[in-house]
């Protein structure tokens, strides 16, 4: 599977109109089984007041709802994401702004793609 197809799992067009809070995340390193390379990926995440869920957004795919794995207010926030019939992913946001994601192909023999970067609170 192409790296861009794996990464696009996270991406959609714009923040929901009724976002309560959110983050803009930039990833500058992407790693695959073949090694690591510079990257220029952005992900916006927002908690949608309408859906009551976290939505992961960018410019390459449709919005994907993330299942929060940690209780609200926890220092470290982790989310599981899955687009039916495609990859699944784990996204982790640390209190200092560091962020890591890993995308796992449907074929368990395929190594995950990982991204490393940082997030800032989105101004609303």
Image (cartoon, rainbow, N blue to C red):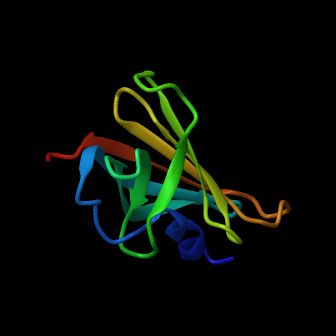
The percent position of residue 21, horizontal first and vertical second, equals: 26, 42
Decide: is 60 above or below 73.
below
Residue appearing at x 44%, y 46% in the figure: 53
Give the farthest residue toward the front. 50
The percent position of residue 26, horizontal first and vertical second, equals: 34, 54
Q: Is residue 103 left or right of residue 120?
A: right
Residue appearing at x 67%, y 64% in the figure: 87
Residue appearing at x 21%, y 46% in the figure: 122
Give the farthest residue toward the left. 124
Q: Where's the N terminus, which quadrant?
A: bottom right
Which of these two is toward me, 115 or 70?
70
Give the farthest residue toward the right. 109
Residue appearing at x 14%, y 47% in the figure: 124
Decide: is 73 above or below 15.
above
The total number of labels drawn is 0
Which of these two is toward me, 17 or 57?
17
Q: Is residue 13 left or right of residue 99?
A: left
- The quarter of the displayed image where residue 67 is located: top right
The percent position of residue 48, horizontal first and vertical second, equals: 34, 50
The percent position of residue 59, horizontal first and vertical second, equals: 36, 73
């Amino acid at each position: 599977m192409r790296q861009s197809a794996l990464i696009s799992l996270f991406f959609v067009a714009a923040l929901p109109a009724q976002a309560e809070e959110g983050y803009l995340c930039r990833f500058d390193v992407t790693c695959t089984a073949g090694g690591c390379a510079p990257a220029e990926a952005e992900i916006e995440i927002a908690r949608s007041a309408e859906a009551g869920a976290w939505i992961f957004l960018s410019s390459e795919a449709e919005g994907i709802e993330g299942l929060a794995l940690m209780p609200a207010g926890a220092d470290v926030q982790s989310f599981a994401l899955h687009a039916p019939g495609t990859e699944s992913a784990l996204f982790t946001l640390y209190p200092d702004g560091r962020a890591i994601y890993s995308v796992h192909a449907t074929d368990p023999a395929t190594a995950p793609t990982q991204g490393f970067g940082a997030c800032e609170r989105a101004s609303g």
